[in-house]
Amino acid sequence: MALFGKKDKEEIILPDKLPDHVGFIMDGNGRWAKKRGLPRSLGHREGAKNFRTIVRHCKDIGLKTISFYAFSTENWKRSADEVGALMELFRDYLADVRNFLSENTRMVFLGDKSAFADDIREKMEKLEADSAQYDEMTILMAVNYGGRDEITHAAKILADKAAKGEIKPEDITEQSISDNLYTAGYPDVDLLIRPSGEQRISNFLIWQCAYAEFYYTDVLWPDFTPDELDKALAEYAKRNRRFGGV
Ligand code: IPE
Ligand code: IPE
Ligand code: MG
């Protein structure tokens, strides 16, 4: 057993076997700001700061694959002001990402990048290419991401191959669908964490969460500390995963 936790706080014992893939739905930024009488955009800024804190902790404890829901295909419904503020945050993040990403961390974006401004899309692609050789930890960052959109995208790729005679309909398997998702090559989600009190998946990694363990907390994302993550990991270790067996 490995021992984690800060000196003055209750120590949390983390199991030797950590989940292969932890997913985070970074929710509650707006409510965090509202509670303080601040504009929602400041909540997003605080949430982005916390993303960096949590990523560092994930690296420290040795997690291998972590995914973060940053912007959904449904989030375009928000006001132009809020969407604009989120795009500015992505720009800031992409501009300074090398300063906070530790060595040997790979960055992959999940979602349809074509909806973004050219400069944002190009920076995402460059970051993916520049970090492609790193393998200690991978951050899967979901932006303009929707699980249904992802599955539809995979279905189109396979249908196109079938129409061209490259594959037969019977060649389509769960594995070939997985191989054509944005997450191709990465493990399914073992533990999905959603702060902010909502208990729903909101179109995040719906295929990959088929057997995920869900962890909900009322803490809002900007307040979700490394200790909260340790708590979630300790809780996950107690779960009995059966995958349909006995
Ligand atoms: C999550 O926080 C960030 C995004 C969806 C972009 P919210 O903005 O959804 O925060 P709440 O749910 O309104 O508190
Ligand atoms: C999910 O949060 C999307 C992200 C955190 C990026 P939402 O705030 O958009 O989800 P709903 O609307 O409460 O389901
Ligand atoms: Mg929300």
Image (cartoon, rainbow, N blue to C red):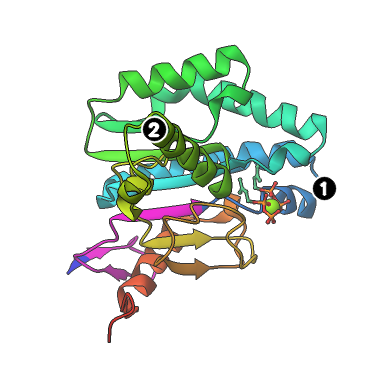
Mark 2 falls on what kind of element?
A: helix
Residue 56 locus on image (x, y percent): 36, 42
Residue 2 or 177: which is nearer the viewer?
A: 177
Magenta residues? 3-24
> Where 241 falls versus 118 (above or below)?
below
Question: Left of 168 or right of it: where is 203?
Answer: right
Give whichever of 167, 238 is nearer the camera.
167
Q: Earlier in the sequence, mark 1 or mark 2?
A: 1
Residue at x 30% of width, y 51% of height: 175
Q: Nearer the viewer, residue 7 or 56?
A: 56
Occupied quadrant, residue 242: bottom left
Residue 50 in view of the camera: no
Determine whether the residue tagged by mark 1 lies in a helix, strand or loop.
loop
Which disc, if any, is residue 161? 2
In the image: residue 8, left or right of residue 206: left
Amino acid type, callout 1: Gly
Neighbour class for label 2 at 10 Å: few (<14), some, many (≥20)? Answer: some
The residue at 45%/32% (across/down) is 160
Residue 216 place in picture, x, y as percent: 54, 68
Q: Amino acid at mark 2?
A: Lys
Whole-number angstrom distance, CA of label 1 to CA of label 2 = 53 Å
Residue that mark 1 sits on: 37
